[in-house]
Image (cartoon, rainbow, N blue to C red):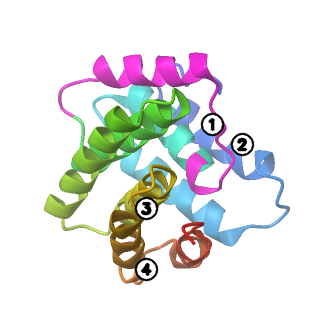
Amino acid sequence: MGASGGSVAGCRAILAELPGRIKKTVNIELDSFCSRKSEMLESSKNLEYECKLATLEILYVWKCLTLTGTQAEEIIQAVNDRPPDLSPSSLAVSYLLVGLSWNTLENPLKAEQAFKISDTITQSDQRDNYITVCVLSEMAELYHHLGQTEDSILMAERAQHGYKGYHLENRLYNRVHNLDIS
């Protein structure tokens, strides 16, 4: 992940690189997502933080984010040190990444807590926010691995009924319907 230098041009350069790194020659959905993200970041007061967050978000959505223990710890620390005035969407993504990080560090209780915070934020933010579906999918898988079958099924059903109408509908459809909770 390159440094943005704190400029919109630097952030756009990072976002422009991502489609090529994700092993797809032509991906209109990804190009559109990156363009939307870079436009949203133009007015950000926390450009460097949100640009790095957007990079991790895109890698996560395209299932290219694999965390090591050290990376997971760095994400948790970065979110703990986050700027105080993030948008609800960025805050929800931050907690989603923290949940993934705690899951990587094999601390399911803290992972669940982070996922629940993200879910609460996305429910109160009425804009187009696909993060809800991602959080519910992650919670379904977490509960499945913990042997909490009823909770796992409940989260999977919420995710399956909530993925329509988002900019990433095709990607979310695949994520939701490939949940491994059987």
Residue range (magenta): 60-85
Q: Name which of mark 1 and mark 4 comes first in the sequence.
A: 1
Does the residue at mark 1 contact the one at mark 2 (Cβ under 8 Å)? yes
Query: Which residue is depicted at the point 38% across and 78% down?
Result: 157
> How many numbered marks are there?
4
- Residue carrying label 4: 160
Q: Position of residue 21 (x, y in %)?
A: 78, 45
Residue 140: numbered disc? 3
Q: Name which of mark 3 and mark 4 comes first in the sequence.
A: 3
- Residue carrying label 1: 14
> In which quadrant is the C terminus drawn?
bottom right
The three-letter amino acid code for the residue at tag 4 is: Gln
Lateral position of residue 168 relative to residue 23, left or right: left
Q: Position of residue 54 (x, y in %)?
A: 49, 42
Local SS, label 4: helix
Residue 125: numbered disc? none
- Residue carrying label 2: 17
Q: CA distance from mark 1 to mark 2?
A: 5 Å
Local SS, label 2: helix
How crowded is the residue under tag 2: few (<14 C-alpha within 10 Å), some, or many (20+)?
some
Looking at the rendering, which quadrant does residue 163 occupy? bottom left
